[in-house]
Image (tube, rainbow, N blue to C red):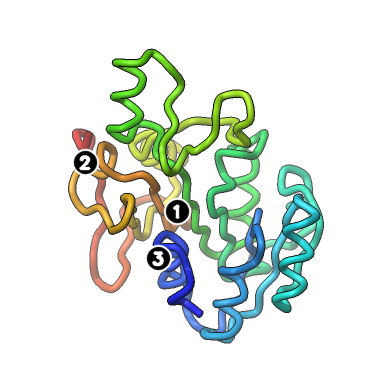
Amino acid sequence: MKSDLRLEDSLIFDFIRPNASVLDLGCGDGTLLASLMKEKKCRVQGIEIDEQAVYKCVAKGVNVLHGDIDSDLPDYADRSFDYVVLNQSFQQVKKPDLVLRESLRVGREVIVSFPNFVHYSARIQLFFRGRTPVTPSLPYEWHDTPNLHFLSILDFAAYCRRRHIKVKATAFVGKTRRVRILPNLFALVGIFLLSNGEGIGRVNGERFKLPQDQG
């Protein structure tokens, strides 16, 4: 059920239209895909490298492959899914540029979510403690983190601009609610809905633009 989802997963759920085909790269225990399957009648496929998480997906009735998203995407045909989801997995892959390029090839639209490394709590820890920050969205110590790349919301927005990736919609998440002001400073997680092509996208008639000075 959508009500059982974390806030960021619920927002990703809202981005996806009913009856769509969805490929979730790094789908974890399959909770998001199970909700999409049951409530939006989506056709879903997950790829997950953790064997225990694969078993949990199967228990939920989610179609899942035990695989590595750094290497498995070339097996999929162009535009074979309506959506490709990288939910907190983009910063964990070895070659994020390649994975995102392949995701945009395989999916008509791509949803990317990632922890915002420059959230104000991380900045405070770096400045006053001189230590690698630990936050609700980055809960790992430096020696056991699965994250290979650390980026901010502004970093990702600039990345998309340089590569002519269209940002169609965004959502930003704090500890308990959505963040609508200065997301680069106050958001723990950024969520971007992307497609190929230049320009600023529209969703429900609303234009997206992330100013350069937002935190």
Residues under numbered marks 1 and 3 in contact, where contact means CB atoms less than 8 Å apart: no
Q: Residue 95: where, in percent of width, then height?
A: 65, 35
**Residue appearing at x 24%, y 60% in the figure:** 207
Measured along the vertical axis of the image, is residue 131 above or below residue 87?
A: above
Residue 211 image label: 2
Give whichever of 106, 27 is nearer the camera.
27
Query: Closest to the observer: 205 or 173?
Result: 173
- Numbered circle sitting on residue 197: 1
Q: Secondary structure at mark 2?
A: loop
- Measured in 3D between alpha carbons, the distance from the residue under mark 1 to the one under mark 2, in whole angstroms, is 20 Å
Mark 1 or mark 2: which comes first in sequence? 1
Q: Residue shown at 48%/73% (left/top)?
A: 4
User: In terms of image quadrants, where is residue 178?
Assistant: bottom left
Q: Give the answer, above or below, for where 92 lies relative to 52.
A: above
Q: Give the CA separation, mark 1 to mark 3.
A: 23 Å
- In the foreground, 189 or 213: 189
Left-right relation of 142 to 94 = left
Going by the numbered disc 1, the residue's amino acid type is Gly
Which quarter of the rendering shows the C terminus? top left
Q: Amino acid at mark 3?
A: Leu
CA neighbours of label 2 inside 10 A, class few (<14), some (14 to 19), many (20+): few
Q: Earlier in the sequence, mark 1 or mark 3?
A: 3
Going by the picture, which residue comes out furthest to the top? 130
Label 2 near label 1: C-beta < 8 Å? Answer: no
Residue 76: x %, y % from top left: 75, 60
* Quarter residue 203 falls in: bottom left
Q: CA distance from mark 3 to mark 2?
A: 22 Å
Mark 1 or mark 2, which is nearer to you? 2
The vertical placement of 173 against 94, above or below, is: below
58 vs 200: above or below: below
What residue did someone put label 3 on? 11
Q: Secondary structure at mark 3?
A: helix
